[in-house]
Structure formats: structure tokens, C-alpha cells
């Protein structure tokens, strides 16, 4: 168990170092950082002095070590565009993205599992067929199109929900939340649907396929033959085995929800890190881009770790083998 | 009336009108699979009885319909398969058309089932203790503590060493033979009257097969549990069963007391099967000695389904389908044993 966790931590560290290398590469090789920092009128000598002061003349490995050291302390330098520390800018924007991802991710997971189980158990029911057909829309329509359609129907035509922005937010310490005001909650609805619909349909189809597979297994047949109730067979025996592989996919989906938030945030002008990243690209704001990359990678790595630990908790076959195994 | 019918008289346990009905009675069972290209008849006109405490061996090539018959009895035919005719009676009460809730009362409590592969019969995510107690609690009105004690007793009974520790282990921590013992314990949870054991040792190491069969036989004798034992192993049948039913292409070919069927088979198909009984000590027990293959369900020959492979076939076999007919002490579906032209009933 300990060895397993250590091995995973080591792998995660390597992944993060690789991502750090990429973001470091952004700094080093895309554009000239000095050019981005000083005005047109700076002299060559001034530029060289700055270059020396920033350590840009040091050997590349030294610079990389310094970059990693700074990143560990959450320092990614000053945003070229906003002239403020990147860490501050991201900390400001992160709550918006996390709230959106959390709401749509939870909804996608809960609804996806519920609908997947339902359509697997009622395979021939008309409602199941309807849900399955409707889910095709979710997988095949691109996210931005769904967003625009929702805006058109609910914001433009019906005028029920806001078309953009986060509504009123309340500051709780360093965290700005939209969950405490009516306009904030209303503003969350359309972006959450847009962001979560694809994941919902994906999880639903996965759960359904997995559940159908599990329902065909011998241990389910045997559970029925033992005279257990349908409820015990479906929701105790089948569901637990169904969710095992779903954990991995769901984890990855939550990760990609945060990554995909870029599109949704752009469509809805949602003031999160995704929108920040898009703007950073337009302005070649390298420090922001680098920090965003590292942040997303970190989120994926953490989610992966959680998924591994969950697996460990749920599947006894992975746990340390006790004595007495075998004959 | 004796609880254990003797092998030699087993065929007659249900013949006396005064006797109470047999434990299980399958009457003219017909199982169909409706499909796009017509309906497949997988089981056709199968009738047999199982008496209390009796072990009925069931043999026949793969695809003969043994598993389907078992699934129909315990009410677990998988759609689109359905019982299209006949009836299944438990103590004379029909159980083939019970509503699901009523059938669940019977499943596990009065009729239990053991499947072929102990490696896949147990849910990998639950300890064997959890699986035992949930089964016990589903059928018996006792508390959790009592259920756990009963689970421990059952594990001891099926020969799991150190049950107090093993009860909290997961299936993957047991060997194949031990898992099948656990499966047997699960089948015995509510002391059923009948266990359908569908090839319970086929997936196991040869070295543990005999132990498992011996265990099953001992427990069923002790608990007076009847067994339908499906197996390809004629040696096991000869040692274990009271009577034998031979299936071919979804029909019964022959049924009768084990000694008769094994030593003096009447039906040509049974003779072919018995020809494959190994010499003592040889380890291949498979049914391979008959030329040709069993017909597919959509191409069952007219008349006697066995006639294309039968060395004794004659004109009538191609035209008329034989029912089970008395053939000495067994009953065989074969025109070599036509009913006597004098229809006087024998007492
Ligand atoms: N779902 C199904 N659809 C069509 N035919 C089936 C289905 N299940 C079983 N059968 C057919 O029923 C016959 C009997 O199968 P089975 O009872 O499993 O045989 P056995 O257990 O004797 O080997 C086989 O010919 C098989 O092809
Ligand atoms: S009825 Fe005819 S074909 Fe069928 S087993 Fe008997 S002799 Fe052979
Ligand atoms: Mg079978």
C-alpha cells in the first residue's frame, strides 16, 4: 500500500516535471521575454542588464531549476498584459472555474450514473430508447454549438436566464462565490449544462454498457439463483462492479471538464481561468499560459491520484495480499 | 415411504396414484427462442421427476439442453428464451408461471443452483462472509449475528479450514476448489430441497474434482437434499447418481436407474456415451465416441433426432418421432423398443 502510493507519487512528480519543462520552453523559446517586458525605446545595454538580472544568461538547466523552484512557491512571474503577479490573477479567476466545473461535473456524474443504470435495467422501455436517442445529441453536438443554442433559447427568446457572466458574487475570504445569490445561481445554469452535457452522455453510455456487461456475469446469475431481491442484485452486486471501471473514466472526465471549460467560458464570457488562458494566448502573455498549463496538469495528476486510491479502496483484489491466499 | 428411493426402484417413485407427488416434476417441458428467422425449439417434450433426496444424473453432449432445463426449473431462463409449453411442479404445485416475487421465495430457499465456474460465481467485491450472510438473511428470519454463526457453520461443513478467518476473505483469496466449496455453502444457506448442480467440477483441477463431488454427495445425503447433477463425467454419474437422464438435441433419449443405464444402456445414443466410459485409471472422461455431431436447433432431423448418427436406424426412425417407452427397467425414446401391441397396462 505504502509502496504503491510512493510509486504513484513518483510518477506524478515525473509528469509534473515534464509539464514544467514544456511551460519553461514557452518562456524560453516563444518570443523574447525581454522584448515583452521593456518598451520599444529601451537601449541594447538596458536590455542586456535586464537579461543578466533575470538570469537569462545562465545555463539552461540552471534556469529550469529556478523555474521549478519558483513554480513550487506558486510564482510564475508577472503577467505581461496585466502587469500583476500571475499567481494573484489565477487565484482571482480560479473560484469561477472550479464552481462551474464542480456543479457540472457533479451533475454529469450523478445524472450519468442514474440514467445509465436506468437504461440498462429497462433496456427495452420506451423511455430508455428516448434517453439513448437524446444522448446521441449530447455526444455529437460540439460544445460551443450547445452553448449558443441554449443562449438563443433561454436567454434571447425566453429571457429566463442570463446569457453571459457570473452574476453577482459574494466574497468569502479569498473565494468569490456565485452560489449565494439568485443571479449567481441563475448564471451558472446554462454554462453548467453546456459544460456537463457531453460528459453526462459519455458517463451514461459507459455506465449502461458496463452495467449490461455486469448483468450478464456468472456472479449476477448466481446472486439471482441464491434468491436475492432484484434490488440487492441490481444496486448492491451489479452497481458496485459497474462503478469500478467508471471511477477511472469519471475522474478523467472531471479533469477534462476543467480543461474544456475554455470553450464554455469563452461562449458565456465566464470570468474563469479558461477565459484567462484564451486572452493570454491572444496577447502572447507567456507567464499566464505557462502557469495555466502547470495548473491543469496538477489538477489531472491530483485527480489521477484520487482515482487510484479510490480503486484501491473499492477493489479488494488490489489490496495487499494477505497470508492464506491459495489453497 | 422411504425417503431415499433405491436406485433400482427409482424409476417407479411416481407411479403409484396414492403416493404424494414427487419433489419435482417436469411435464412436457418446451422451451423456445423466438427469433427473426423463426422460432427455435431448444427443449421439446421433456418430462422427468426427481424424488426427495434423490440424485438425478443428467448427461448429454454440449448443447443438448441440460443447462436450459436447469434454468427453466429455477425460473432464470434468459429472455428471449421462454417456457412455451408443459409445466414444472414442485410438490405438485406449478412453479413455472409464478410471479417474480413468489419465484424468488423458491429460489435459493427450496431450489438452489450451482454453476460450472466457481471462479466467476462469486462477486469479487464482497467477502464470502457478506455473500453468505446476505443469502441467509434473504431466506431465514434471523438476526445478523445468528446469520454469521450459520455462515461459519456452513463453511465448517463444506470443509473450509479456519473459517473464522476465512469468512472475511474475498473470493480471489481462495483456490478454485475452495471457491466451489464456498459456492456449495451458499447453495446450502437455506437448506433447499433440491440443488441443480450444472457441471460443478468441469472448471476445476482434476485433482479436486473428486473431492467436490464427494462433498456434494455427502452433504446431500446428510441433508436429504435432492440433486440434479449435470456432468460429462460418466464415472461420477456411475458413482453418485441414483438415476440418469440422457438428453439429446433438446429431448430426453433415455432415463432410468443408474446401474441399468450405465451397464445396459438401451438407447443407441446412450450406448455410444457409455462406450466412452474410461477404463479405470484413464483420465479422459469425455463423450467422443459417436460419429457426427448433434444437429443444430434449426435443423433437427425428422422422426428420431438421432437417426442420422444411429447405426441401428431403420425406416420408422426417419418418419415417426419416438416417445419415451419402457425398455426393460429404463425408458428410452427409441423405436427399437416399441410399446407392446397389447395395450393392457402392466401393474
Ligand atoms: N439465448 C439463446 N438463443 C438461442 N439459442 C440458445 C440460447 N441459449 C441456449 N441456446 C441453445 O439451446 C441449446 C441448449 O443449450 P444448453 O442448455 O446450454 O446446453 P447444455 O447445457 O446441454 O450444453 C443449445 O443448442 C443452445 O444453442
Ligand atoms: S429410434 Fe431409430 S434412429 Fe432413433 S435411436 Fe432408436 S434406432 Fe436409432
Ligand atoms: Mg451447459
Image (cartoon, grey):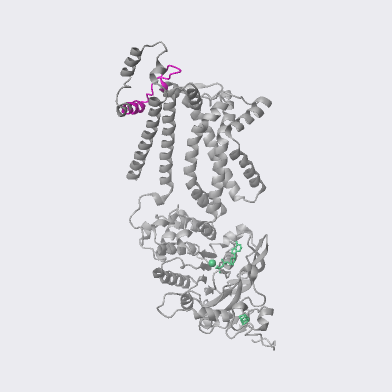
**Residue A49 pos. (x, y %):** 32, 15
Specify the quadrant that holds the C terminus of chain A.
Answer: bottom left
Q: Residue at left 50%, top 45%?
A: A246
Quadrant containing ligand 2? bottom right
**Residue A326 pos. (x, y %):** 36, 60
**Residue B21 seen in the figure:** no
Residue reaching furthest to the front: A44
**What span is colored magenta in the figure?**
A64-86
Above or below for A258 versus B174: above
Q: Is residue A21 magenta?
A: no
Q: Residue at left 69%, top 79%?
A: B319
Rendered image quadrant of residue A161: top right
The answer to which of A164 and B310 lies nearer the viewer is B310
Q: Is residue B21 left or right of residue B183?
A: right
Q: Is residue A68 magenta?
A: yes
Q: Residue at left 52%, top 36%?
A: A106
**Residue B86 pos. (x, y %):** 66, 69
Specify the quadrant that holds the N terminus of chain A.
Answer: top left
The answer to which of B228 and A228 lies nearer the viewer is B228
Q: Residue at left 31%, top 18%?
A: A52
Amino acid at each position: 500500500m505504502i509502496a504503491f502510493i510512493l510509486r504513484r507519487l513518483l510518477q506524478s512528480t515525473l509528469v509534473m516535471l515534464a509539464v514544467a519543462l514544456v511551460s519553461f520552453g514557452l518562456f524560453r523559446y516563444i518570443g523574447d521575454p525581454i522584448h515583452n517586458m521593456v518598451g520599444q525605446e529601451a537601449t541594447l545595454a538596458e536590455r542586456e542588464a535586464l537579461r543578466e538580472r533575470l538570469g537569462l544568461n545562465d545555463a539552461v538547466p540552471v534556469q529550469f531549476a529556478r523555474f521549478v523552484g519558483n513554480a513550487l512557491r506558486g510564482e510564475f512571474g508577472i503577467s505581461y498584459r496585466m502587469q500583476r503577479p500571475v499567481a494573484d490573477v489565477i487565484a482571482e479567476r480560479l473560484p469561477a472555474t472550479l464552481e462551474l466545473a464542480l456543479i457540472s461535473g457533479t451533475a454529469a456524474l450523478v445524472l450519468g450514473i442514474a440514467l445509465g443504470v436506468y437504461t440498462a435495467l429497462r433496456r427495452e422501455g420506451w423511455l430508455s430508447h428516448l434517453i439513448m436517442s437524446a444522448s446521441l445529441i449530447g455526444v455529437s453536438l460540439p460544445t460551443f454549438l450547445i452553448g449558443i443554442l441554449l443562449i438563443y433559447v433561454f436567454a434571447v427568446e425566453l429571457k429566463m436566464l442570463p446569457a453571459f457572466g457570473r452574476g453577482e458574487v459574494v466574497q468569502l475570504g479569498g473565494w468569490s462565490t456565485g452560489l449565494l445569490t439568485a443571479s449567481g445561481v441563475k448564471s451558472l445554469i446554462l454554462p453548467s449544462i453546456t459544460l456537463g452535457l457531453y460528459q453526462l452522455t459519455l458517463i451514461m453510455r459507459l455506465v449502461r454498457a458496463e452495467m449490461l456487461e455486469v448483468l450478464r456475469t456468472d456472479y449476477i446469475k448466481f446472486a439471482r439463483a441464491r434468491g436475492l431481491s432484484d434490488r440487492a442484485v441490481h444496486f448492491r452486486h451489479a452497481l458496485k462492479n459497474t462503478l469500478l471501471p467508471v471511477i477511472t473514466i469519471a475522474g478523467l472526465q472531471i479533469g477534462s471538464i476543467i480543461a474544456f471549460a475554455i470553450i464554455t467560458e469563452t461562449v458565456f464570457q465566464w470570468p474563469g481561468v479558461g477565459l484567462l488562458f484564451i486572452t493570454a494566448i491572444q496577447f502572447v502573455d507567456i507567464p499566464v499560459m505557462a502557469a495555466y498549463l502547470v495548473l491543469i496538469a496538477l489538477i489531472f495528476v491530483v485527480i489521477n491520484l484520487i482515482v487510484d486510491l479510490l480503486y484501491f479502496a473499492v477493489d479488494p483484489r488490489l489490496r495487499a495480499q494477505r497470508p492464506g491466499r491459495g489453497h | 415411504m422411504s425417503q431415499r428411493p433405491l436406485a433400482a426402484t427409482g424409476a417407479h417413485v411416481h407411479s403409484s396414484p396414492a403416493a404424494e407427488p414427487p419433489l419435482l416434476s417436469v411435464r412436457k417441458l418446451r422451451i423456445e427462442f423466438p427469433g427473426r428467422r423463426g422460432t427455435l425449439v431448444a427443449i421439446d417434450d421433456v418430462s422427468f421427476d426427481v424424488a426427495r433426496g434423490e440424485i438425478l444424473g443428467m448427461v448429454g453432449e454440449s448443447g443438448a439442453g441440460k443447462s436450459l432445463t436447469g434454468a427453466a426449473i429455477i425460473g432464470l431462463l434468459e429472455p428471449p428464451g421462454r417456457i412455451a409449453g408443459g409445466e414444472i411442479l414442485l410438490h405438485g404445485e406449478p412453479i413455472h408461471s409464478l410471479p417474480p416475487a413468489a419465484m424468488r421465495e423458491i429460489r435459493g430457499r427450496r431450489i438452489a443452483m450451482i454453476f460450472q465456474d466457481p471462479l466467476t460465481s462469486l462477486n469479487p467485491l464482497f467477502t464470502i462472509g457478506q455473500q453468505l450472510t446476505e443469502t441467509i438473511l434473504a431466506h431465514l428470519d434471523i438476526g445478523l449475528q445468528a446469520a454469521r454463526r450459520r455462515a461459519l457453520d456452513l463453511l465448517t461443513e463444506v470443509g473450509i479450514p479456519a473459517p473464522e478467518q476465512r469468512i472475511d476473505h474475498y473470493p480471489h483469496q481462495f483456490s478454485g476448489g475452495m471457491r466451489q466449496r464456498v459456492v456449495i455453502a451458499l447453495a446450502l444457506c437455506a437448506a433447499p430441497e433440491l440443488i441443480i448442480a450444472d457441471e460443478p467440477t468441469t472448471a476445476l483441477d482434476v485433482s479436486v474434482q473428486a473431492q467436490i463431488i464427494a462433498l456434494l454427495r455427502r452433504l446431500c445425503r446428510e441433508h436429504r437434499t435432492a440433486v440434479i447433477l449435470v456432468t460429462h463425467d460418466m464415472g461420477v454419474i456411475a458413482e453418485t447418481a441414483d438415476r440418469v437422464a440422457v438428453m439429446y438435441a433438446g429431448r430426453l433419449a433415455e432415463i432410468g436407474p443408474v446401474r441399468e443405464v450405465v451397464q445396459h444402456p438401451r438407447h443407441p445414443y446412450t450406448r455410444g456415451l457409455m462406450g466412452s466410459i474410461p477404463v479405470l485409471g484413464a483420465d479422459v472422461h469425455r463423450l467422443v465416441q459417436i460419429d457426427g455431431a448433434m444437429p443444430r436447433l434449426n435443423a433437427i432431423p425428422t422422426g428420431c433426432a438421432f437417426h442420422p448418427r444411429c447405426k441401428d436406424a431403420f425406416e420408422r426412425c426417419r418418419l415417426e418421432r419416438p416417445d419415451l417407452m419402457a425398455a426393460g427397467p429404463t425408458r428410452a425414446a427409441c423405436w427399437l423398443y416399441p410399446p407392446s401391441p397389447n395395450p393392457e397396462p402392466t401393474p
